[in-house]
Amino acid sequence: MAQADSREYALEFFREEGFERRRCRVGGEYFWTLNPDFDTCQDAPCVEYWFDRIRSRGPMSVGDARRAFIGFFQRHGHEPVEPRPVVARWREDLYLTIASIVVFQPHVTSGLVPPPANPLVISQPSVRLEDIDNVGLTIGRHLTSFEMAAHHAFNYPDKRVYWKEETARYAFEFFTREVGIPPEMIVFKESWWEGGGNAGPSFEVAVGGLELATLVFMQYKVADGRYEPIPLRIVDTGYGVERIAWFTQKTPTAFHAIYGDLLGRFRSLLGVEEPPEDLMWAAFRAAGRLDPEDPESLQAYYTRVARASGMDVEEARAVLEREARLYSVLDHTKTIALMLADGVVPSNTGEGYLARLVIRRALRQMRLLGADVDLASLVDLQIGFWAGDFPRMREERSYILDAVSLEERRFRETLEKGARLLAQLLKRKRTLTLDDLITLYDSHGVPPEVVAEEAARRGVKVEVPHNFYSIVAARHKAPERVRAIGERPELPDHVARAVAGLPETRRLFHEDPYMRRFRARVVAVVDGRYLVLDATAFYPKGGGQDYDIGVVRGPWGEARVVETHKVGGVIVHVLDRPVEASRGDQVEGEIDWVRRYRLMRHHTATHIVLGAARRVLGNHVWQAGAEKTVEKARLDITHHRPLTREEIRRIEELANRVVDERRRVRAVVMDRNEAERRYGFRIYQGGVPMEPKIRILEVEDWDVEACFGTHLANTGEAGAIKIVRAERIQDGVVRLEYVAATRVAEEAARLEGILSEAARLAGGDPESLPRRLSGLLEEERRLRESLRRYRSLLLDALDARAATAREVDGLKTLAFEMPEPDRKAAQEVLRRLTSRHPELVAAALIDSGDGLQVEIAAGSTAAGRVDLGAVARELAARLGGRGGGRGPRASLRLPREARSRLEEELAAVLGEALKGS
RNA sequence: GGGCCGGUAGCUCAGCCUGGAAGAGCGCCCGGCUUGCACCCGGGAGGCCCCGGGUUCAAAUCCCGGCCGGUCCA
């Protein structure tokens, strides 16, 4: 805050209206007010909540507050903009839409693209999970999902819209006229905002302890700790829609205001008793001062509430904790519905994990409440409640409920597993350490509260540190970026640098994807091997499509193009040999058409398959990755279950129908805002291009995506599509592999080849292969059985030999050849033999090709008299090998020549060992 | 994307640290006992110890690589 010059805040508006600048007695911040009695900034925690006593227009629901806000700004020259999904698909550094400004980052805020309207108004549903553990406890200050209403103005050097004066006045007028708050109750607190490399002064608008809005003036770039003015100055505001509803409804908690009747439904379904009203108002009063992260503050809070409502502290704590859990479940179920409606698939990575996090926390709270209701039905109530505001919830209802039920089942399984693990742990130890708790949670997903509960049942007391989850979080290092999209450099650095400043290459492959030959001029050549032309039909690697190869001919002869890459807008051909090319040379290029045509077919097939998968499985299907090669195409899609055979069949069938329908495929370059408005964010399947104009590829009435690749003019050219593989590659992601057109025949031929080879090996034709195979398996089973009988015969023979074996000092010794080179079998025979002859020491000889493997075993009597390990070592020493063992068995490896002396030496060594004993 | 845990009989798991003849409970099959039950007694079948490589006389066990599953974090 020290960064700001006080002049940043001295607005003409304040002077005109008669605002006075004061300093908060508690927190020391400066603020502007019309009220001579205010000596605090009116924001928590400097002051407790008292807005229930401040006059305002009658009760407004969340929807009312939103409509009032948008209506007000629309009347004041702002164009309403449709909110975006809560999943920030257009951002590579964020998973969730955490604020309205996120909608305009990075393309608009960086100046690359104009805003969709200017000035504009929006109410953006946002999801923030950082404070998820505080939700409920603070009776409404923290929510995982909320609507951020905002008016934004983008001031360019050559186009000023409005700045601080107008912004402050709008806020003042909105709150006084639309919400009906008395002017003297409104306080503008001076503040400083920083985020995402930008910064600027801001005002926080607080009334009666509640911060209702933040007005940010983004005007600096933060570079090396210094603030540099930026050309594009942005008015970034954020009004809490839920808070406005809370403010006008004067309810003890925000949850009462946001959820109305739904609160009561949840209360009875979750079995949470209605708390005494005076307790809740005491909580309201005290909550503004509560710092939920600080155990002392929490204790003080409970004490204060207890005293004010004449209750025992522990009793008050118990009631408030149950209330907090109820509110959490309300909050989380709404967030779950919002996230899943926008197509998030719960998984163990990315935004999918965030969805799982919320779902699991909701389930945990329900469990702690001892509630006997399933999560899906609670989410369903939310869908019904919000369907008017967020229609996508209703459209995606069946997916949402299915995904939630599945997650619920999986969590239950995880807990069951955890309970078993815990039971085993407690069998061994009397107490659980923090490390045990962390392992149980981090590696096995069992939350510490559940551990404590289970442990208590077994009479073991477990202390869970209040900052347990922070401890866990601290053990994980932060990654560098959240999503890996974008091009990786494929060219040597110096080449990339050398071509970087060149003019954009004309893309003949876009003008005519069917062009095979072209003429062009040399623009640059690096190291003789990296050729840049003014125009090219060679497609560079990108957008999941492989590059073209071919030949170029120039005055210096012909060279093969072995790779093609893109550096910004410049296309670089990599030649197989250096050439004497120079700038201005006329060249002719020819691409490898067979390769290219297959790539095109696989690329268009990918768009067709994606559209088919979405229709069969649902709108939550997004491309999670794709690759098109000459041989086949691969598409990873988000989906919460493994695909069934039937689903795969239907996707394939639908895809082929689109092929048969001969739909047109068209590419149009259009303005980014226009494309987003017309087609939505579904166009960003393969990533988000950083361009003001984007190339839109449309498969007629089937699929629309931003795409750089080369495509067929008509789906009919894909010929046919055959899905050759479908597998779940990770939680929430299914991979499809398929081939198109002539590759289908090749694939069929390949499989046919495998089949006939298998049939040939099995001795028959492909038709009879299954029958033949089951016959072979049966035969194998019979052979094993025979082998077992022959081993018994061997055993009987050895049995007889053992009876007359050589005696050494009361023991018997025997060496025999093992007819099969199988150590396991030898050990088995030895075991059975020595169990029949307790006094026997037997050696089985196995010819292992490069030497002699000897397994020795002793019967129980013999084992009691000699240490076979020592015998084996001595034997190895005498015969030039190595060996050892323990207890009744030993093994050794000897040179082949040792065979003739083995039996003799064994008896000798044994004799000496016995003498020693 | 990264961290952690796991993969042994149909199921749930022990054995692995410290290498030396693959185990338990449940389930299954057979027999006995019993009106009956999550009864009891006796016997039995059932294993590429995830895969590949390495170390070793010897690997379920140690080392390396992979595959698969779980889980947490951003």
Image: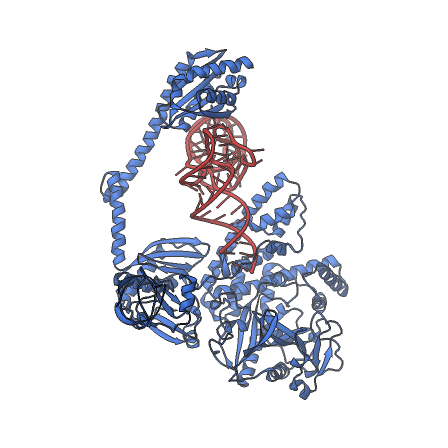
Instruction: Give me the residue at 26% from left, 61% from top.
Output: A594
Q: Picture quarter containing residue A842?
A: top left
Q: How is the image coloured?
A: by chain
Q: Which residue is at the front of the view, A212 or A246?
A: A212
Q: Residue furthest bottom?
A: A16
Residue A702 horizontal/vertical position (percent): 34, 68
In this rendering, the count of numbered labels is: 0
Residue A885 horizontal/vertical position (percent): 50, 25
Horizontal side of residue A748 vs A620, given as left or right: left
Residue A737 visible? yes
Q: Picture quarter containing residue A206?
A: bottom right
**Which one of the lettered chains is coloured blue?**
A
Residue A348 horizontal/vertical position (percent): 50, 55
Q: Residue furthest front?
A: A580
Residue A249 visible? no
Residue A399 horizontal/vertical position (percent): 45, 62
Horizontal side of residue A793 vs A350, given as left or right: left
Asked if residue A729 is positioned above or below residue A257 in the image, the reply reads: above
Horizontal side of residue A281 vs A269, given as left or right: right
Q: Quadrant of the C terminus of chain A?
A: top right
Asked if residue A667 is positioned above or below residue B30 in the image, the reply reads: below
**Which one of the lettered chains is coloured red?**
B
Instruction: Give me the residue at 62% from left, 48% from top.
Output: A437
Q: Quadrant of the N terminus of chain A?
A: bottom right
